[in-house]
Amino acid sequence: MSLVVVGGGLEGVEALGEILRAYRHIPELAVHLVEGSNTLLPGGAAALSSEILRQCQAYPVTFHLGDRVKAVTKTRVRLASGKSLKSDLTLWTGGAAPSPLLYESGLSISTDTWAAVEPSLQSQVFDNVFVIGDAAGLPTSVSKQAYHALDMGSHVATNVKRFLAHSSLKPFKSGPEISLISLGDIDTYLVVGQRVFAGSALAPAKELIFQANMARLDPPLRIPAALQLQARYWQGIRELTVPLLWPPSSLKRLANLRKLA
């Protein structure tokens, strides 16, 4: 089987890691990752890109950096460089692009721009419209990550109430740029600005944050939601924490936390 992952950002790297976690034991597996930039996770620490490339040398992965997709068919992915990649399955994880709705509704000035908003997340065009998430073009941009979008939603809920009460609006203040990135079960990375830490011990922390955000999206206020949260929690314990603790010889990995940059 030949798989092609288009995009080497956060989604592409984590998709690659999960493919390797589940299928790297298959002898016939071949994985290609295509990224238009010359590094993985564009805009991030260069050391992290180099580390992921190094980690993947032991696996059937070929990286096509600085290249772009020209065409996708049922069986091939053709690149701008002229390369043609066999593909039984193509995963498209390319970066976010503005929805045509933003321009058609008058919220943005062109088809390739986000909806300009005030620091309060109020539209600069229509004062009765608030914009959150990827679509929001703040004066000081923030990364297009789910945790920012969730915070924006909570903030706008408050500002809508203030708007309806004719009160002054509060500016949105984004939280710190901290990311936990997993490469399947191969390694996990903590990114704080341009500083990068790596180690298997970070995997349970990523799962904990994930489950906390899931609980935020689906508050366990009723029995079905509570049971689903409990099931996800124990699945994470079995798949991530137990392998770190058993057999006892694996405990040394807990201390294997290293700084990359």
Image (cartoon, helix red, strand yellow):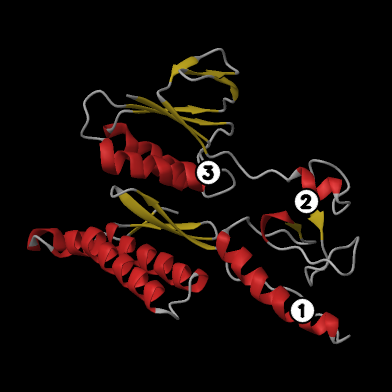
Secondary structure category for the residue under label 3: loop
Left/right placement of residue 34 relative to residue 56 reads right
Say which residue label 3 marks: 9
x then y, percent, for residue 1: 32, 24
Spatial CA distance of label 3 from label 2 is 20 Å
Spatial CA distance of label 2 from label 1 is 20 Å
Q: Are marks 2 and 1 in contact (CB under 8 Å)?
A: no
Say which residue label 2 marks: 114
Quadrant position of residue 189: bottom left
Q: Is residue 174 visible in the rendered structure shown here?
A: no
Query: Which residue: 55% across, 33% down?
Result: 38
Between 162 and 69, which is closer to the camera in this rendering?
Answer: 162
x then y, percent, for residue 149: 63, 64
> Which is nearer the N-term, disc 1 or disc 3?
3
Circle 1 packing at 10 Å, graded few (<14), some (14-19), many (20+), is many
Q: Tag count in the figure?
A: 3
x then y, percent, for residue 187: 32, 51
Instruction: Work out which quarter of the rendered image holds the C terminus and state it.
Output: bottom left
Between 150 and 231, which is closer to the camera in this rendering?
Answer: 231
Circle 2 packing at 10 Å, graded few (<14), some (14-19), many (20+), is many
